[in-house]
Image (tube, grey):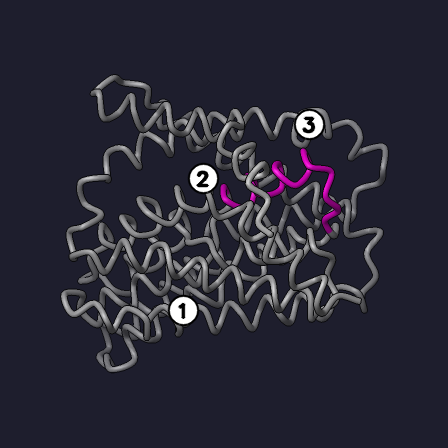
Amino acid sequence: MFDFSLAIGNLLSIPVLVFLLAIVATRLKTEVRLPDAVYQGITIFLLIGIGLKGGHALKTAGGAEFALPAAAAFGLGLVIPVLAYVFLKLAKKISQTDRAAIAAHYGSTSLVTFSAGLVTLESLKVFVEPYVATLLAIMEIPGIIVGIYLGTRTDSSEAGRARIIETLREVFLGRTVILLVGALLAGLLAPEQSFAKVQPFFVDLQPGILVLFLLQLGVIVGERLKSVTSAGWALPVFGILMPLLGGTLGATAGVLAGMSAGGATMLAILTASASYIAAPAAVGIAMPQANLGLALSASLGITFPFNLLIGIPVYLEIAKAMYASFGH
């Protein structure tokens, strides 16, 4: 049975309440936006902090234990954008290019949703495998590439090929991947005493820094509320049902890959989330004709608030049920 106390506790958590505050303030035309330099700095902080923590934790994880979840994450990164693309065919007002652009956003992952999930599970003292940050890095790339392929597969022009090359460069050498993977390696290679020196800043402060990030995202969501129905009601319906489908697939795959209920929850959160940092840059290069506002309205205006307010406790309950049925 669904644990409503968990859902209520999540809704009353500081990060969620600040997120809602920012939405309300923005709708009331009160300026609470962070300076852009601060917002970018917080993004870098979270990427490095999550990477260092995950890399340091990887030292205790066995390769065999990690192999199946990594394969599951990669496979889901390929499958989710295809499912999103097919699902969006039901929305007649959305073009093929825009369907592919949205699919690329949903095939990739949300750093902040991942961070919020970790904070929630840590507060509940739910065990999570130390390598989950690596799964975030694994899923960041394939979904974007598949979504872009779906939108550009009929373009054989020289300009189209040039855009694909530039897109691949953005995907593999973009800030998100470089900082996250680089920090993972740094955390893995650094000796214990070196990690201990930076842990109070990059790890212990993460919950508080996350609150500031959610303040900024609340402002952006508040500004986009009017545009969520621009393609009809199909987009809001997709923005809620797609993460539920992705989350269920992620929780099931995580448990079958040998993860704990907490680890499977984090994989579910990854598969249920949608990118609004890495994907827009790559899609904008590969498909300049795509309506990025539509993709961001879905990923950031609908799916992100749904996951933050409701989705995380739902995925935990799904993972618990799957673990009770199929866990080892």
Residue 27 percent coordinates (x, y): 23, 26
Which residue is depicted at the point 61% across and 38% down?
120
Number of dots carrying numbers = 3
Quarter of the C terminus within the rendering = bottom right
Asked whether 15 or 294 is in front, the reply is: 15
Residue 5 percent coordinates (x, y): 58, 36
Mark 3 crowdedness (10 Å alpha carbons): few <14, some 14-19, many ≥20: few
Q: What amino acid is labelled 1 in the image?
A: Pro
Q: In whole angstroms, how far apart are the C-alphas of marks 2 and 3? A: 23 Å
Residue 24 percent coordinates (x, y): 29, 24
* Left or right of 279 on screen, residue 230: left
Asked whether 84 or 149 is in front, the reply is: 84
Q: What amino acid is labelled 3 in the image?
A: Asp
Kindly indicate the quadrant of the structure image that contains residue 143. Answer: bottom left
Q: Main secondary structure of the magenta part?
A: helix
Q: Which residue is mark 2?
A: 309
Q: In whole angstroms, how far apart are the C-alphas of marks 1 and 2? A: 23 Å
SS for callout 2: helix
Q: Which residue is mark 1?
A: 81
Mark 1 crowdedness (10 Å alpha carbons): few <14, some 14-19, many ≥20: many
Q: In whole angstroms, how far apart are the C-alphas of marks 1 and 3? A: 34 Å
Kindly indicate the quadrant of the structure image that contains residue 309. Answer: top left
Where 44 falls versus 247 (above or below)? above
